[in-house]
Image: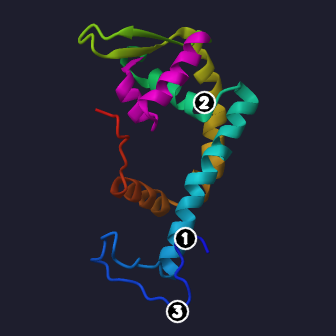
Amino acid sequence: MSGTERPMGETGGTSEEHAVDAPPRWLDEQEKAAWTGLISLVLLLPGKLESPLRQEHGITLFEYLVLSHLSEAPGRKLRMGELAFLASGSLSRLSNVVKRCEQRGWVVRTPDPADGRYTLAELTDAGFDIVDRAAPTHLRTVRGLVLDSLNTADQKALVRIAEKMRIVPDDFG
């Protein structure tokens, strides 16, 4: 049993029951199918998106997202907190990745001149070159795995669902 299915002979609670002591509200078939689809996307898609980037360019998906967001930012600079949010990662994960990118000469970190409490990450020319070379690979993969198999209504549904389920990292602020 997956932890979301109802054991035989048990009944579920009502939609108002969310307390820890309340019996679980088991998933019906439609909910189970939706949950299975979502968790499959969440767990399997990132690896499929990352594999071509690793094979062809030696970078992870998260590294690509960090470099890509920096490449699109004004002056190719962003505060670390904003970059963490845009790349869907925590500040600690971003710090580790930016450190590796600094060691490769792709990013430099400096105090924010507007407010020294913040750190800016800035994409170097070498960093721009790697993201520029990796972008077509990533685009082909995104199209092949996701966008080309969805019609306009499906794509709009994904946007709508993502907006409803917006999850912001705890340490973004």
Name the residue at the front extreme. 21
Residue appearing at x 47%, y 75% in the figure: 31
Query: Which residue is denoted by mark 2 in the rendering?
Result: 135
Q: Residues within 10 Å of mark 3 (few under 14, many from 20)?
A: few
Taking the image as shown, residue 121 lies to the left or right of residue 133, namely left
Q: Residues within 10 Å of mark 2 (few under 14, many from 20)?
A: some
Question: Looking at this view, is 71 or 29 the one in front?
Answer: 29
Mark 2 or mark 1: name the one nearer the start of the chain. 1
Distance between mark 2 and mark 1 Cα atoms: 39 Å
In the rendered image, the quadrant that contains the N terminus is bottom right
Taking the image as shown, residue 130 lies to the left or right of residue 58, namely left
Query: Which residue is denoted by mark 3 in the rendering?
Result: 9
Residue appearing at x 32%, y 82% in the figure: 14
Residue mark closest to the camera, 2 vs 1? 1
Q: Which residues are magenta?
A: 77-103
Amino acid under disc 2: Ala
Secondary structure beneath dot 1 equals loop
Amino acid under disc 1: Gly
Distance between mark 2 and mark 3 Cα atoms: 53 Å
Query: Which residue is denoted by mark 1 in the rendering?
Result: 3
Mark 1 or mark 3: name the one nearer the start of the chain. 1
Q: Quick check: can you spot residue 68?
A: yes
| Residue 87 percent across, percent down from the top left | 46, 34
In the rendered image, the quadrant that contains the C terminus is top left
| Residue 163 percent across, percent down from the top left | 35, 53
**Would you place residue 167 above or below residue 65 in this image?**
below
Amino acid under disc 3: Gly
Secondary structure beneath dot 3 equals loop
| Residue 57 percent across, percent down from the top left | 70, 26
| Residue 48 percent across, percent down from the top left | 67, 46
